[in-house]
């Protein structure tokens, strides 16, 4: 969840090692994406969904995580840590009109903002391409086609 | 309107977030993956093939989990899994699942490939599948019937 706010939404808060709270606007996914692909080379939950998935790639310097030791709500505050080594942040989304139209009416408009897509998931993908460090290794085995 | 970072700070009110971490295999429908992690932390996803992904510690060479992708399709194609999903309280060892997939589906593709390519690919794949199988066997990782039902 902390990764979603930090890397995809863009507006987040974290506590440093002095327990001082910082708010930060990372710009989120749309500002920081360095490459976009369409299509996953693997099966998804329904036929042809794999073809419609868009993959946004970015290379943030930091990661946002919850501490592993969080016995109380006070301890469960996001931290900013260095990004995992040799990794690209990948966000998987459905943005076609068809997919957006299938989102329930109650979700499609959130506090007056119309939704343009559905984020399916995100992860740090490892390792990076030896020649193009903004891409994961062997992108052609992972994704069907590059958009930009 | 509540600022997103304020919403984030309120997340600890979700009881789940401060529950002690328990390693379990969980099915995530939106990405159609079965995910098993033995540590409560971020990970680096290292793709092996269209079915298996190894999950590494963010900064160390420690395997901390695996992802099985396209899990719904596999459950629906596999009569044994579909049968188990109708049963009660059965836990299926993840090690068996990883190994059986390799034997049934990867082996066929490897037999069909040209000999040099086949040898190289087989070696790399076998190492990674061995790693995953040994990891989940060591962890005694199992998938519960309720997760199988969600996938099936």
Image: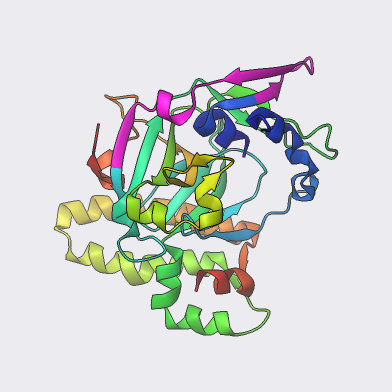
Residue A98's place in the image compared with A111, above or below, is below
Q: Please, which residue is most extreme toward the left here?
A: B114
Q: Is residue B47 magenta?
A: no
Please indicate whether residue A59 sits to the left or right of residue B4 in the image. Answer: left
Of A95 and B86, the residue lying toward us: A95
Q: Residue at x 31, y 64 (%)?
A: B106
Please indicate whether residue A109 sits to the left or right of residue B125 in the image. Answer: right
Query: What x and y, as percent, mark residue B111?
Result: 21, 66
Q: Is residue A26 magenta?
A: yes
Q: Which residues are magenta?
A: A13-37
Query: What x and y, as percent, mark residue B139?
Result: 64, 57
Residue B51 showing in the rendered view: yes
Please indicate whether residue B105 sits to the left or right of residue B13 in the image. Answer: left
Please state, as top left, top right, bottom left or bottom right, where the C terminus of chain A lies in the image: top left
Residue A77's place in the image compared with B35, above or below, is above
Residue A35 in which image quadrant: top left
Residue A29 in which image quadrant: top left
Q: Residue at x 77, y 35 (%)?
A: A76
Query: What x and y, as percent, mark residue A13?
Result: 67, 24
Query: What x and y, as percent, mark residue A100?
Result: 41, 52
Q: Residue at x 31, y 35 (%)?
A: A36
Residue A108's place in the image compared with A104, above or below, is above
Residue A42 showing in the rendered view: no
Q: How many marks?
A: 0
Q: Residue at x 49, y 46 (%)?
A: A121
């Amino acid at each position: 969840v902390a990764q979603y706010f930090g890397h995809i939404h863009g507006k987040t808060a974290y506590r440093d090692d002095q327990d001082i709270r910082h708010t930060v606007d990372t710009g989120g996914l749309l500002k920081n994406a360095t490459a976009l692909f369409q299509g996953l080379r693997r099966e998804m939950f329904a036929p042809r969904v794999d073809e419609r998935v868009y993959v946004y790639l970015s290379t943030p310097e930091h990661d946002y995580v919850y501490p592993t030791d969080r016995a109380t709500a006070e301890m469960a505050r996001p931290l900013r840590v260095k990004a995992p080594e040799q990794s690209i942040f990948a966000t998987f989304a459905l943005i076609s009109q068809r997919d957006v139209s299938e989102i329930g009416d109650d979700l499609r408009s959130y506090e007056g903002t119309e939704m343009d897509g559905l984020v399916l998931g995100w992860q740090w993908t490892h390792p990076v391409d030896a020649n193009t460090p903004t891409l994961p290794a062997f992108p052609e085995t992972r994704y069907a086609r590059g958009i930009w | 309107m509540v600022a997103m970072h304020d919403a984030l700070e309120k997340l600890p009110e979700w009881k789940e977030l401060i529950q002690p971490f328990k390693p379990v295999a969980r099915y995530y429908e939106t990405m159609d993956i079965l995910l098993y992690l033995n540590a409560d932390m971020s990970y680096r996803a290292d793709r092996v093939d269209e079915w298996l992904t190894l999950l590494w510690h963010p900064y160390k060479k420690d395997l901390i989990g695996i992802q099985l992708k396209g899990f719904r399709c596999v459950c629906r194609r596999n009569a044994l899994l579909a049968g188990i999903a109708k049963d009660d309280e059965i836990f299926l060892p993840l090690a068996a699942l990883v190994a059986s997939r390799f034997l049934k589906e990867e082996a066929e593709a490897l037999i069909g490939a040209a000999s040099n390519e086949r040898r190289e690919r087989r070696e790399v794949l076998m190492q990674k599948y061995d790693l995953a199988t040994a990891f989940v066997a060591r962890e005694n990782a199992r998938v519960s019937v309720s997760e199988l039902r969600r996938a099936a």
